[in-house]
Image (cartoon, grey):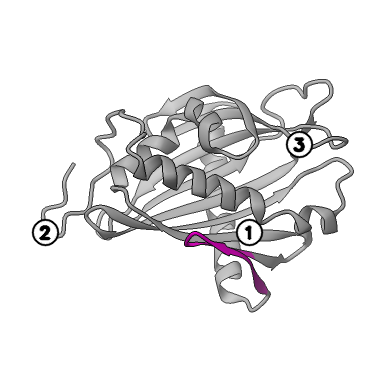
Amino acid sequence: MTALKIRIRSTLFAFLLQLLVFTVFGQEGCQLKKDGDGIKVWLCETNNSAFKTIKVEFEAEATLKEYAAGLLDIESYKYWQHNIIEPRILKTINEKELIYYSEVDTPWPISNRDLIFYLKMWQDSISLVLKVSLEQLPNYLPVKDGIVRIPEAESLLTVAPINDHRVKVTYVLHVDPGGEVPAFLANMFASQTPWQTFKNYRDRLESGNTTKIPIPFIRNYNSKGSNTQ
C-alpha cells in the first residue's frame, strides 16, 4: 500500500471514526460493565453490527509527552497490552504515523487472532488534546496458518490535559473478531481486556517505567501559560 493510498484511506477513515465516536457518546444504548481502580468500561450498541462498541474512561498521572511516547514504542506493548504477543513495526511512515503488527493470545479452543494497525497521532494546537487513531488493514500481509486475521477494527484514543502532570483518557473501540466467535460470547467478555490493558499502562506510567524517546511534535500542558515543547 503506497503512502498516497494510506493518506486517502486515512482521510475517509477519520470521517467514519468520528461518526462512530459521536454515535457512542450520543446514544443511550451504553451500559457500564466494569468500574474498578478508577477505570470505567461501557459496552454500547453499534449500528449494523452485533459486536458492541467499547468505551473506556480514566485518569492518569502523566504528561502528554509521556503518554504519547509509550504509544509509539510498539515493542513495549507486550509488557502492558493484555494478551498481546509479538508486537512489531512493519512500516514507519513518519514520526506520527506507522503500521504495526501484533498477535492476540486467545484461550483454547479459540484460534489466536492477529492485527495490522495503521496508527496515526495528532494534537490540537489550542487545547493540546492528543488523539491517536487505529485502523485495521486486514489485507496488508498474507494470513498466517492457524491464526485468524481480524477483519475489522477501529479505535480512537483521546488524551486531554487536566493539569501539568495529569490527563483524562477516553477510548472508543469497535472490533469484529472474525472466525466463528459468536457476538454474544465476544460481548460477554469484551470489558475485561481494555480494563486490564489500561490499568497496566496507567501503572506503568505512574511507576516511572515509561519510554524515554524524544517526541518534539507533542507539546506538554503548562498551567503557567507557556505550553512546552
Looking at the rendered structure, the secondary structure element under dot 2 is loop
Predominant SS of the magenta segment = strand
Residue at mark 3 to residue at mark 2: CA–CA distance: 47 Å
Visible residue check, residue 11: no
Q: In terms of sequence position, does the residue under pointer 3 or pointer 2 come before the other?
A: 3
Magenta stretch containing residue 49, yes or no?
no
Q: In terms of sequence position, does the residue under pointer 2 or pointer 1 come before the other?
A: 1
Looking at the rendered structure, the secondary structure element under dot 1 is strand
Provide the residue designation for mark 2: 225
Looking at the rendered structure, the secondary structure element under dot 3 is loop
The residues colored magenta run 30-42
Where does the image place residue 165, in percent across and percent down from the top left? 25, 52
Provide the residue designation for mark 3: 106
Amino acid type, residue under disc 3 in the picture: Thr
Where does the image place residue 143, in percent across and percent down from the top left? 77, 24
Amino acid type, residue under disc 1 in the picture: Ile
Q: Quadrant of the C terminus?
A: top left
Asked whether the residues under the numbered discs 2 and 1 touch, taking CB atoms below 8 Å apart as contact, a structural biologist would say no
- Assess disc 2: are there few (<14), some (14-19) or many (≥20) residues with their C-alpha within 10 Å of its C-alpha: few
Amino acid type, residue under disc 2 in the picture: Gly
Q: Is residue 229 left or right of residue 200?
A: left
Where does the image place residue 156, in percent across and percent down from the top left? 52, 52
Compared to residue 140, the image places residue 133 above or below, namely below
Q: Quadrant of the N terminus?
A: top right
Provide the residue designation for mark 1: 54
Magenta stretch containing residue 31, yes or no?
yes
Q: In terms of sequence position, does the residue under pointer 3 or pointer 1 come before the other?
A: 1
Q: Nearer the viewer, mark 3 or mark 2?
A: 3
